[in-house]
Image: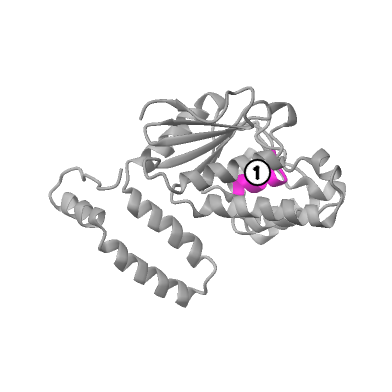
Amino acid sequence: MANTARKQDKAESVLLRRDEDGICRLTLNRPQQYNALSEAMLDALQNAFDELAEESSVRVVIIGAEGKAFCAGHDLKEMRANPSRDYYEHLFAKCGRMMTTMQRIPQPVIARVHGIATAAGCQMVANADLAVTVPEARFATSGIGVGLFCMTPGVALSRNLGRKQAFEMLFTGEFISAEQAVEFGLVNYAVPADELDMKVAELASAIAAKSAAAIAAGKRVFYRQLEMDMEEAYGYAATEMACNMMFHDAGEGIDAFIGKRKPVWKHK
């Protein structure tokens, strides 16, 4: 696919989009505000994910950011300018919907984290399917430092980290290093800055080379079975795997393996 720029120019849009070879790159573009999640940013991300859910030509989504930070969480100035419970419920519900949509789109989402990720920014990293960072990056659920427990980020953290690691971050609000983030299971890799794009591209290309139908089905089943007990999860996964076996791509892939040839996937 040819390189394309979406929406507005870089100076105007809070979210940039570039598509190339089946890979969509979304870039948070509020560098002066450390890419804080304003309502406009949340809306832009929601719209982007809604669009991507219908775009079979896109195989992988990468989320990165401009400036020094990946994302500093919610826009606190915007929040304090609207001091009502109704507004806050609306805001956090909007963020939750965006995070849920990110996991429900059929494409795997990779977070490219080049700088700090705090509060809802750390939530976005935890919420992504995969994440790659640099040794200089740091991560925190820092709301507790201003008297606000990071309850919604805790939803994503509790589904990625061990309970004690999650509580350590949530109770203290202190930063953890990129190395700790790998140990905790928050990110997959921490690589030197000059290798970040190469590692992200390596992951994206490996995924894009696989059957889009199988990847989409697998992502959906993975998140659904997490909320089931083991017996229910195995029953559900067995039924869905049997359905997957009926896909054109499964038959093609197995025949290609037996015939010692490269498979030709139906869905591009």
> Would you say the magenta stretch is mainly helix, strand or loop?
helix
Relative to 27, is 10 above or below?
Answer: above
Question: Which residue corresponds to the image point at 72% horizontal and 46% vertical from the top-left?
Answer: 119
In this rendering, position of residue 255 left or right of residue 206: left
Question: Which residue corresponds to the image point at 76% horizontal and 40% vertical from the top-left?
Answer: 75
Question: Which residue corresponds to the image point at 85% horizontal and 53% vertical from the top-left?
Answer: 84
Find residue 134 and report its image quarter: top right
Mark 1 surroundings within 10 Å by alpha-carbon count, few (fewer than 14), some (14 through 19), many (20 or more): many
The question of residue 7 being in magenta is answered with no
Helix, strand or loop for disc 1: helix
* Residue 176 visible somewhere in the drawing: no
Q: Which residue is mark 1?
A: 42
Q: Nearer the viewer, residue 100 or 234?
A: 100
The question of residue 121 being in magenta is answered with yes
Question: Which residue corresponds to the image point at 20% horizontal and 57% vertical from the top-left?
Answer: 251
* Residue 27 visible somewhere in the drawing: yes
- Residue 1 is situated, as x and y percent measured from the top left of the image, at 35, 30
Q: Nearer the viewer, residue 120 or 101?
A: 101
| Residue range highlighted in magenta | 117-126
Which residue extends farthest bottom? 231
- Residue 36 is situated, as x and y percent measured from the top left of the image, at 71, 37
In this rendering, position of residue 230 left or right of residue 249: right
- Residue 94 is situated, as x and y percent measured from the top left of the image, at 67, 52
In this rendering, position of residue 114 left or right of residue 3: right
- Residue 187 is situated, as x and y percent measured from the top left of the image, at 57, 44
Q: Nearer the viewer, residue 188 or 61?
A: 61
